[in-house]
Image (cartoon, grey):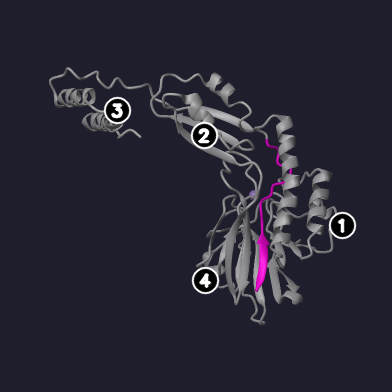
Amino acid sequence: MLTLLHAADLHLDSPFRSLPPEEARRRRQDQREGLEALVGLALEHRVDLVVLPGDLFDSQQVYPETLEALRRALGRLPCPVVIAPGNHDYYGPRSPYAAGPWPDNVFLFREEGLTALPFPALGLTVYGCAFTGPFREEDPLAGFTAPRDGGTAIAVLHGEVAPRGRYAPIAPDALAHSGLAYVALGHVHAAGGDPQAPVPWACPGCPWGRGFDELGEKGVLLVRLEEGRARWEFLPLPGPRYLSLRLPAGEDPAAALAQALDGHGEDYVRLTFTGESAPLDLSALRAAGEGRCRVLQLRDETLPPLDLWARAEEETLTGCFLRELRRRLDGAEEADRPRLRRALRLGLAALEGREAPL
Ligand SMILES: [Mn+2]
């Protein structure tokens, strides 16, 4: 059995333009430190190989300390590391990758064409290629079939499974005929893949969220190759998460806010108040949330409270319904009131042809 750690789209040295400069610097430092956590997972699971299909850097401009942190982290690994440069960190004479030297265990695809990288001690051949510019429209697996030599063959590629596109589209047909045991992809920032496909493929997504378009838990894949079958599991990485929460404002929006932020001290949170409420004082609520998470964005999507009894005197079905509900509420035990209030809101919405309230 072979075990792989598969990570991609690290986007080291991202500008984090939406953040104040100091917070952006902190995030880039988080990324450098995150490399140690990533390598720590590879050590903990004693993997045979680490594969990194591209976009390790966000651009061709990389801080020297970032390059040094990456070299140092990868050089700590007792196993080979294979990198396939992507559209952001494409290989070229001015690429950060060309500013060697790299540790001896780090292997880099530099060619646009598919290249074989044999690891005889593992009984494994890794196929891969590099982006050499920001776009690549040819399918890297077009016409390729791995030779049947008794070993295991996988590919490490930056690209996506799609019939066509500007980022190394891999046609499902080319994938199916590749004879590979696993295709380790990078590019799409959300985790995905197909373990049931004739040739299983996966994409780990980015290991750390960088904005509200990269939400939730992020991490890497631990891939096991056994008798030509690939299975994998998602391993989350520590670090701040970007979360988008929707929260009914209720009677006490400040209390609801405090409860919703519990345990999110290190996260970036976008919180949208929903439901019916008197106008919210967002600056007061922002002050109440201060320090409870790294960055708090508040949005008010509440609707003004409906005057539920406005039509109670009408001689209509709606009026009869409201009067009957009021009679029952007046005589109800406290425990029955929430159910009756819910019936009132749902019934009124139905009678007025509105969407049922949440
Ligand atoms: Mn990317």
Q: Nearer the viewer, residue 306 or 188?
A: 306
Judged by depth in the image, the label closer to the viewer, 2 or 1, is 2
Q: Determine whether 141 is above or below 311 in the image.
A: below
Position above or below: 51 against 59: below
- Mark 2 or mark 3, which has the lower sequence index? 2
Q: Of the residues shown, which amino acid type is indicated by label 1?
A: Pro
Q: Residues within 10 Å of mark 3 (few under 14, many from 20)?
A: few
Q: Which residue is mark 3?
A: 334
Residue 198, disc: 4
Residue 343 appearing in the image: yes
For label 2, count other residues whose C-alpha is less than 10 Å away and answer few (under 14), some (14-19) or many (20+): some
Residue assigned mark 2: 260
The amino acid marked with disc number 4 is Pro
- Magenta segment's dominant SS is loop
Q: Is residue 141 visible?
A: no
State the extent of the magenta-drawn residues as a range: 1-16
Residue at x 69% of width, y 57% of height: 41
- Among the two numbered marks 4 and 1 on one chain, the one whose residue lies closer to the N terminus: 1
Q: Residue 164 sits in which quadrant?
A: bottom right
Q: Residue 263 in the image: x percent, y percent?
A: 58, 38
Q: At 65% from the left edge and 79% from the top edge, which residue is drawn?
A: 147
